[in-house]
């Protein structure tokens, strides 16, 4: 029965083919197919596949009592926020991130805190030697935490060892790509191995009730490498992100069976490990470039928490036939939409300009509420007029050019007031539900046209280069400004 089956498996998405080809038809990647022996790689172990009669089990009701508290907080508030309140018993969590982003650091800190709180916490490193992990713990000031540590890669050995003694509350496997199981033939690191190893560990978690965290590497385009298949098997997928040059790290839930997926946890990498940042707005606004054109502060909501962040835009004359549109931290298709609305309804001609938009601090915004702030930053850069430094912006722009209300207005306003902002530019219909209780001056805008006219009135295309021209341009800004008014002229 156990015939050896060779097939070509895509190392990116796990699709299998019976002959080699250059491109994976499933995920579109090139040169990702590798020959693997997939004997025994089907999801069931041999014992279950045999024709024995099934074991009888009892069916439970939904109202039954569970004795144990289902969740165990890690002691790191930012981590717990993302997991939805702590680690669930018997659950498996995948943490992905670029190499060097701080996954091992985060999980060393989490296991140490659990161990210090008196729980059995195990850290299995497949990448580093015990001495290296100890060195990191020493640096983090956690060397005294009673974490159980090992450098192992065989899943069978790990499962047997951990089945002894009390059930561990938390097991960290760093990383799943280094694990191998002898139930399948292929080499460690291949999709088949990773999938089989993850399956064995997931089975152990469900059976024992231990919470397992798998660390996964990420490929250059942000996918958790190889085992995208693993993403479907685990209960939650967290992604640890950040920009190499900056100290902020953001932990984000991509999938979560036990909690929300829109929460973020914010950390700062310091010489002594990761520090939790409980007020991210302060961090994201800490090195603002006050008074320069093209920046607008967006009052956003990440999960349940308001977060203020600076949007930076640069609109510059292009030399290319097709102008560049580059965006970091925001949805490129929303940028295209905002640009189209600016062109169609506000007479802002952008086809001769390259447009760059960046969300400061490495944050990734997903809310449509950022439309208004993005539009304000873009127009501000185009007409070279700085926006008021004490203003925050939020509102969704519709294709008709109207500014639509967004949820949680008062939370956004309160956060802005707390950080010392004096006014908010927001959709018209939002005034009622906020009540202005935050003490901010509310500038409501019904349509994008009036916002554009407002910003254009603040400055002229040349006010930075030559002051003598400035008042001439300020005097006459029409509501529907013509394209020529916005064009930057040299000399
Ligand atoms: P690490 O957790 O090993 O990353 P990963 O497991 O995601 O590959 O973190 C590596 C980086 O973090 C490394 O560049 C050094 C930095 N670091 C600090 O800045 N401070 C610290 O206290 C620690 C432990 C690491
Ligand atoms: Mg690591």
Image (spheres, grey):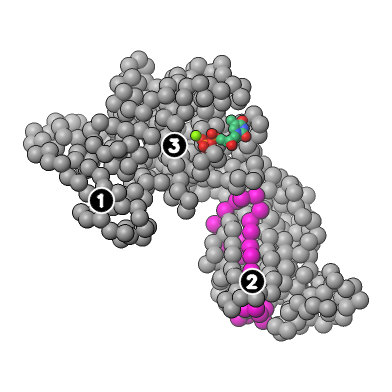
SS assignment at label 3: strand
Residue 346 visible to an observer of this rendering: no
Residue beneath disc 1 = 8
Q: Is residue 431 above or below residue 280?
A: below
Q: Total number of numbered labels?
A: 3
Residue 353 image position (x, y, % from top left): 65, 74
Q: Quadrant of ligand 1?
A: top right
Going by the image, does 330 lie left or right of 213? right
Residue 355 image position (x, y, % from top left): 64, 69
Residue bounds of the magenta highlight: 344-371
> Label 2: few (<14), some or many (≥20) within 10 Å?
some
Q: Is residue 344 above or below residue 150?
A: below
Q: Is residue 142 above or below residue 259?
A: above
**Between 361 and 412, the one nearer to me in the picture:** 361
Going by the image, does 367 lie left or right of 459? left
Q: Magenta stretch containing residue 29, yes or no?
A: no
Alpha carbon distance from label 2 to label 3: 39 Å
Residue beneath disc 3 = 215
Alpha carbon distance from label 2 to label 1: 43 Å
SS assignment at label 1: strand
> Label 3: few (<14), some or many (≥20) within 10 Å?
many
Q: Magenta stretch containing residue 356, yes or no?
A: yes
* Quarter of image, res 335: bottom right
Position of the C terminus, as image quadrant, is: bottom right
Going by the image, does 8 lie left or right of 126? left
Q: Is residue 125 above or below residue 215?
A: above
Residue beneath disc 2 = 354
Residue 448 image position (x, y, % from top left): 66, 73
Q: Indicate yes or no: mark 3 CB to ligand 2 under 8 Å.
A: yes
């Amino acid at each position: 029965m156990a015939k050896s089956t060779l097939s070509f498996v895509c190392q990116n998405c796990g699709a299998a083919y019976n002959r080699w080809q250059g491109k994976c038809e499933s995920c579109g990647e090139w040169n990702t197919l590798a020959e693997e022996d997939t004997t025994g790689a089907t999801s069931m172990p041999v014992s279950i596949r045999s024709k024995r009669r099934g074991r009888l089990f009892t069916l439970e009701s939904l109202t039954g009592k569970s004795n144990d508290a289902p969740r165990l907080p890690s002691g790191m508030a930012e981590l717990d926020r993302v997991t939805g309140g702590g680690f669930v018993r018997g659950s498996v969590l995948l943490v992905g991130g670029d190499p060097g982003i701080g996954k091992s650091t985060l999980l060393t800190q989490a296991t140490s805190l659990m161990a210090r709180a008196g729980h059995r916490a195990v850290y299995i490193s497949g990448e580093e030697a015990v001495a290296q992990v100890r060195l990191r713990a020493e640096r983090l000031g956690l060397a005294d935490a009673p974490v159980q540590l090992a450098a192992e890669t065989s899943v069978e050995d790990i499962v047997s060892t951990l089945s002894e003694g009390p059930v561990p509350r938390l097991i960290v496997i760093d990383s799943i790509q280094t694990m191998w199981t002898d139930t399948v033939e292929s080499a460690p690191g291949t999709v088949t191995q990773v999938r089989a190893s993850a399956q064995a560990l997931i089975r152990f978690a469900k059976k024992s009730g231990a919470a397992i965290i798998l660390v996964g590497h990420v490929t250059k385009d942000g996918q958790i490498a190889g085992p995208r298949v693993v993403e479907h098997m685990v209960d939650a997928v967290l992604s640890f992100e950040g920009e190499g040059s900056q100290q902020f790290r953001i932990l984000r839930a991509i999938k979560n069976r036990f909690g929300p997926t829109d929460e973020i946890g914010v950390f700062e990498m310091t010489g002594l490990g990761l520090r939790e940042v409980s007020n991210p707005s302060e961090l994201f606004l800490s090195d603002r470039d006050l008074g320069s054109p093209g920046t607008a502060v967006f009052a956003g909501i990440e999960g349940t928490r308001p977060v203020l962040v600076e949007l930076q835009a640069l609109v510059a004359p292009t030399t290319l036939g097709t102008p560049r549109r580059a965006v970091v931290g925001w949805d490129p298709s929303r940028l295209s939409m905002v640009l189209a609305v600016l062109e169609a309804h506000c007479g802002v001609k952008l086809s001769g300009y390259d447009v760059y938009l960046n969300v400061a601090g490495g944050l990734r915004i997903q809310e449509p509420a950022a439309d208004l702030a993005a539009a304000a930053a873009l127009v501000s850069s185009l007409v070279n007029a700085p926006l008021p430094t004490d203003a925050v912006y939020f509102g969704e722009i519709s294709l008709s050019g109207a500014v639509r209300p967004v949820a949680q207005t008062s939370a956004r306003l309160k956060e802005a007031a707390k950080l010392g902002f004096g006014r908010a530019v927001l959709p018209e219909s939002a005034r009622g539900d906020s009540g202005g209780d935050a003490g901010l001056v509310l500038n409501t805008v019904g349509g994008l046209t009036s916002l554009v006219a407002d910003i254009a009135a603040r400055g002229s295309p040349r006010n930075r280069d030559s002051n003598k021209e400035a008042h001439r341009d300020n005097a006459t800004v029409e509501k529907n400004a013509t394209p020529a008014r916005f064009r930057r002229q040299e000399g």
